[in-house]
Image (spheres, rainbow, N blue to C red):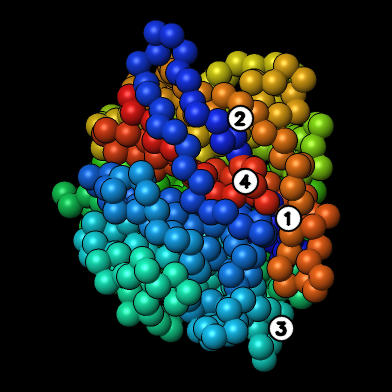
Amino acid sequence: MSIKLVLLVVVACSALVLVPAGAAATVSSPVHVTDDQFAANEESLGMSPDGQILMGMWNDWHFNDGCGISYSTDGGTTWAPESFAPGFTSFTNDPNVAGTGVYAVAGDPVDLYNPKSGLFDVICQSFGGLKNKSRVQLLATTFNPAAANPSDPADSYGLGAWRLPAVPITTGTANGSEKGSNGNFPDHEAGTVDTGSGPGHHFGRIYIAWAQFDGAGGSPILLAYSDNDGASWTGPIHVSDAGHQFDQDATPRVGPDGSVYVSFTNGPNEKSTKSNAAMIAKSTDGGNTFGPSLVAAPMNAPATSLPNALYRGGTDVTSTVDQRTGNVVVVYNDESSGALNVWSTHTTQPGNLSTFTPAEQVNASGQTQFFPWLQSAPDGRVDLAYYDRSCDPNDVLVCVTLSSSTDSGATWTSTPVTTAGFDGDMFGACLAFVDPPDCTNFFLGDYIAVASTDAKAQVMWTGNGDHALDAITAAVTP
């Protein structure tokens, strides 16, 4: 969510899923986690290793123009009434409930289950301070579902379930940190947790990476890490090297040997779509230093918009690491095949970033595919969720697809998570902070979410509800 983009929208199909004949995967009925007057989008999803405790987050204009939340303790079958993450914004939409932060707006949520503490680590981009209206920060807190009261959504399930005040990840020492009015700000953060305990690992360490728009036309990738659930941070640390400074879509991941990888999109300047590439860098010292930025795949035909839509979208990069083989899988989407499709490449030698294969289409289609997101299960299965218009020959209505690989991305099996398409422009992103609300903005978000265990992939996306764009989830069982 950029500073100029204080508009939000959401999308998804809400039909019961029918898996094609012969397919091994089964899909649960989609569950609407939100049912709002205003939009929810850009979901993040954390899940415990047994798949039973989940926390969903999204950009939310229903409660407090901040980061919406809900959680489930039964594997995603039922969810607590939606609420908001405290510690970020200075108000709520309930006059009886005071805000607990100092910012006007928050979004771009990241939530990660940390097996070391049993807590969810929560990060949100926050901006529009009460004293310094141009300030932008990435702030971190924690959520403890064991201390939460699902009957108290008006008070974030009880403030005792949270660590407050939220802690800044960026401190203003890096060029551009904490400023938004002149184009300097940290943006589109993503995170991961080191869940390994063997040699080379830092069990429970949180890694957060982002693009740092520096106000001078550059946007290098930075990273910070925490060993205490975000109570204190080391960083910012430069990920992209001096030759690659026009970047976006940072995704950190940890390999089975503890190596840290960060993938991102790179271009020759902040406006060019020529010579763009899916890049990746590696750290072997727990994220303290990174090697050179290397090309995982050239982007021969990147897109900056979507056909037949008012909501925005285009080319994105995401990555994960096969936890069985150690091979890195990088996915992006471009228009090399004609339509904007999802493409995949992977290393052929674990940890060797010079061995990426030529990219191939994951699930070839003549219709648009966008917003890919990758995750990996402990047993090596790689799960890729994305919006997919293959369900509509007219390339207008949107469905959600999960493609999975058990051979480090060499081959993929695709399962429709939804089969009835939805119109992403049916609902505008009604902005609650405008009086009267402005519902003419169209924004589906910039990403969706998937979390994986050996037993299932839990997908969360934006789709049409009864009144607005809502957050929806379903489980895919291999």
Gap between marks 4 and 1, in whole Å? 12 Å
Q: Nearer the viewer, residue 374 or 9?
A: 9
Question: Looking at numbered disc 4 in the image, what kind of residue is underneath it?
Answer: Gly
- Please name the residue that numbered disc 3 is placed on: 133
Closer to the chain start, of discs 4 and 1, is 1
Say whether residue 415 is left or right of residue 303.
left
Residue at the spot x=56%, y=36% of the render? Answer: 14
Location of residue 5 in the rendering, given as x and y in whole percent from the top left corner = 74, 61
> Which label sits on residue 399?
2
Location of residue 181 in the rendering, given as x and y in whole percent from the top left corner = 76, 75
SS of the residue at dot 1? loop
97 shown above or below 74: below
- Please name the residue that numbered disc 4 is placed on: 465
Labels 3, 2: front one = 2
Residue 11: name its quadrant: top right
Would residue 457 be seen by someone viewing this image from the given angle?
yes
- Please name the residue that numbered disc 1 is placed on: 429
SS of the residue at dot 4? loop
Question: Looking at numbered disc 1 in the image, what kind of residue is underneath it?
Answer: Ala
SS of the residue at dot 2? strand
Residue at the spot x=67%, y=33% of the render? Answer: 422
10 Å crowding of disc 1: few (<14), some (14-19), many (20+): many
Location of residue 389 in the rendering, given as x and y in whole percent from the top left corner = 66, 26
Q: Nearer the viewer, residue 265 or 292?
A: 265
